[in-house]
Amino acid sequence: PLISSTDMLHRAREGRYAVAAFNVHTLEMLQAVTEAAEEMQSPLIIQSTVGTVKHLGPDYIAAAATVAANRTGLPIALHLDHCTDFDIIVKCIRAGYTSVMIDASMLPFEENVSRTKKVMEVAYAAGVNVEAELGKVGGVEDDIVVADQDALLADPEECVAFMARTGVHTLAPAIGTAHGIYKGTPNIDFNRIAAIAELVTAPLVLHGGSGIPAEQVKLAVSLGMAKMNIATELRIAFSDAIKQVFAERPGENDPRTYMVPAKKAVKQLAIEKMQLCGCIGKA
Ligand code: 13P
Ligand code: ZN
Ligand code: NA
């Protein structure tokens, strides 16, 4: 069965590695990250955005993720990424999601606290992990668009107050990363990560994982980031592999022929990200 991400993330924080969390959009992507985890004997977080929940249906996604967990016997959690809508969170928990993110980071602090607490109540009964965000991660993720000048770093003291008020399991503090591919090197505030990690014992989440140079990922993880989200790079790998098939054979019309290389590309990239996170062999 799928399990909550709470234990695996605590273990990661203690062991100073991160669990790679992959956004998937198709069955093949879900299979690809699962095969990567199986080969690497890694714990795994499969996640979907609200857009993908609407596109595929939470029950289909939960069913496929459950098969992944049952077939491999690995610790696998299914996570709802960046959700602003309480009703969708409840729907996903009912469908079998074992981890959810309530993203009220665009709202004032008090409102973020109260919305997170409301999700904590429904998640508690179901044994589901809850992730919340403080500050604002820049870039584009699904329908959530944060312009560079509106991105906001999380305040360490505010993180402490937020944890005390909400009891949330997992915290995503904005520390300078952004969704999507960076123009140049990301401007990550490592001192801020260290300051937050000193005050907050909960596992911390690194958003905007695509495009962060390897050394920066390793440093962020060593400082306390226990989960790294990767979305854009996986989508690009998947799509590029398909584009290449059609560039070579425009008349191709058997989905299996282009899904096979697409799946392979995602699997290879997932393995690379797991190596960066240090979660290999931690299943
Ligand atoms: P990237 O698209 O930069 O990988 O960000 C992923 C993410 O944070 C999903 O929540
Ligand atoms: Zn994110
Ligand atoms: Na990114």
Image (cartoon, grey):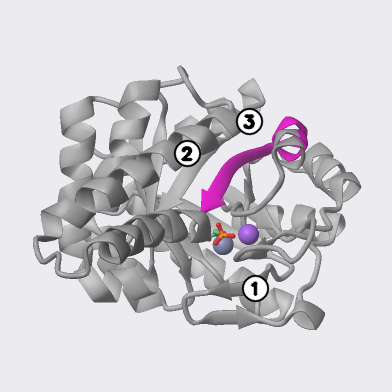
Check mark 3 vs ligand 1: CB closer than 8 Å? yes or no. no
Q: Name the residue under label 3.
A: 13
| Amino acid bearing label 3 | Arg
* Range covered by the magenta-colored residues: 219-230
Q: Residues within 10 Å of mark 3 (few under 14, many from 20)?
A: many
Q: Which residue is drawn at 34% across and 59% down?
A: 244
Q: Which image quarter holds the C terminus?
A: top left
Dot 1 lies on which element? strand
Per the model, the C-alpha gap separating discs 3 and 1 is 26 Å
Q: In this view, does 283 lie above or below 67?
A: above
Q: Which image quarter holds the N terminus?
A: top left
First along the sequence among labels 3 and 1: 3
Q: Mark 1 points at which residue?
A: 139
Q: Residue at x 15, y 53 (%)?
A: 257
Q: Residue at x 81, y 46 (%)?
A: 193
Q: Is residue 202 above or below residue 275?
A: below
Dot 2 lies on which element? helix
| Amino acid bearing label 2 | Thr
| Residue 92 picture quarter | bottom left
**Disc 3 vs disc 1: which is toward the camera?**
1
Q: Name the residue under label 2.
A: 6
First along the sequence among labels 3 and 2: 2
Please state the horizontal and vertical placement of residue 200, each as a whole percent of the image.
Answer: 74, 43
| Amino acid bearing label 1 | Gly
Residue at the farthest front position: 248
First along the sequence among labels 1 and 2: 2
Please state the horizontal and vertical placement of residue 51, each as a whole percent of the image.
Answer: 36, 75
